[in-house]
Amino acid sequence: MEAVDSVQLIVAALAAGVLKGAGETASAAVADAYQLLKNALAGRIAGNPAAELVVAKHADDPETWEAPLTAVLRETGVGGDDDVVLAARKLLDLADSSDAQPKQIVVDAKGSNIGAIGDHAQQHNNFGAPPAGN
């Protein structure tokens, strides 16, 4: 498997930030990391109107602007900026961990055979009357 280079990492982090770092459902940590990456990138491309335009357009439509963004980041040498790369790694780590939150699913299995499916599944069976309040 080919290793991801720093420009690909930055592009992936910006796309993840657009998808997970904006809106009401974003965690504060992901939103903050996205803003940190955008600020680090803005400082690196300041004074380059073409690069600034592509980064702004990518935020509106990441899929369409992925290739132009990749080209601009390579041309400007942003992939060699340790602060930008570190901010991108942090954002991707936070965005990935936000997907790993455990979810609770309640299933009414009256009269069924019971089993557990899934990663790290736990099963607690209570037989008899349901707990008070249900």
Image (cartoon, rainbow, N blue to C red):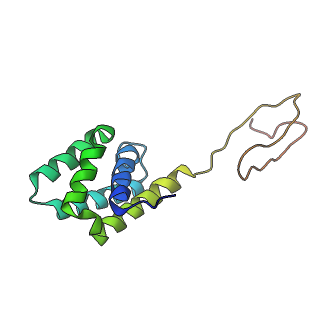
Residue pictured at 37% horizontal, 54% vertical? 13
When the figure is inspected, residue 96 is found, relative to residue 113, above or below; the finding is: below
> Relative to 109, is 41 on the left or the right?
left
Residue pictured at 34% horizontal, 66% vertical? 85
Residue 89, x across and y down, in percent:
40, 63
Residue pictured at 38% horizontal, 52% vertical? 12
Residue situated in front as seen by the camera: 66 or 103? 66
Residue situated in front as seen by the camera: 58 or 134? 58
Residue pictured at 39% horizontal, 49% vertical? 16
Quarter of the image that includes the C terminus: top right
Tell which residue pokes out farthest to the top in this image.
Answer: 111
Residue 10, x across and y down, in percent:
34, 57
Residue situated in front as seen by the camera: 35 or 130? 35
Residue 48, x across and y down, in percent:
10, 56
Tell which residue pokes out farthest to the front in this image.
Answer: 1
Residue 71, x across and y down, in percent:
24, 52
> Relative to 28, is 77 on the left or the right?
left
> Relative to 60, is 22 on the left or the right?
right
Q: How many marks?
A: 0
